[in-house]
Image (tube, rainbow, N blue to C red):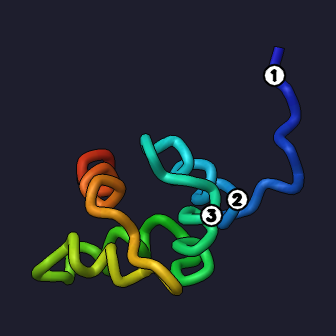
């Protein structure tokens, strides 16, 4: 038996849900990332372009930088 898909699920909501599955990554950090990148594909392509991926990810934070362990987890689960 197949359930109907939830109609309020959009690209950003799905992307945010994926990010929240990464250990130590909070909803606040996921929201910060999804405000800058509208989907996972754009986010991954931008990371791939960067020479220093950790430094790039840390710079995504507005008031505070994203911690190194969270950045390492992002790279671990996406690459």
Mark nearer the N terminus (2 vs 3): 2
Q: Quadrant of residue 48?
A: bottom left
The x and y percentages for residue 30 are 56, 62
Residue at the disc numbered 2: 13
Q: Residues within 10 Å of mark 1 (few under 14, many from 20)?
A: few
Residue at the disc numbered 3: 28
- Which residue occupies the foreground of this view, 78 or 23? 23
Count of labels in the image: 3
**Residue drawn at (83%, 14%) of the image:** 1
SS at mark 3 in the image: helix
Select label 2 or label 3 by which is in front.
Answer: 3
Query: Is residue 40 found left or right of 52 in the rendered image?
Result: right
Tell me the CA gap for discs 2 and 3: 13 Å
Select label 1 or label 2 by which is in front.
Answer: 2
Q: Quadrant of residue 14?
A: bottom right
Q: Do the residues bearing badges 1 and 2 touch, measured as CB atoms within 8 Å?
A: no
SS at mark 1 in the image: loop
């Amino acid at each position: 038996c197949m359930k109907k898909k939830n109609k309020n699920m959009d690209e950003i909501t799905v992307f945010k849900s994926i990010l929240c599955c990464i250990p130590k990554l909070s909803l606040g950090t996921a929201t910060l990332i999804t405000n800058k990148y509208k989907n996972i594909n754009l986010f991954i392509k931008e990371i791939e372009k960067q020479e220093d991926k950790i430094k790039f990810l840390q710079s995504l934070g507005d008031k505070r930088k994203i911690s190194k362990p969270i950045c390492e987890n992002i790279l671990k689960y996406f690459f």
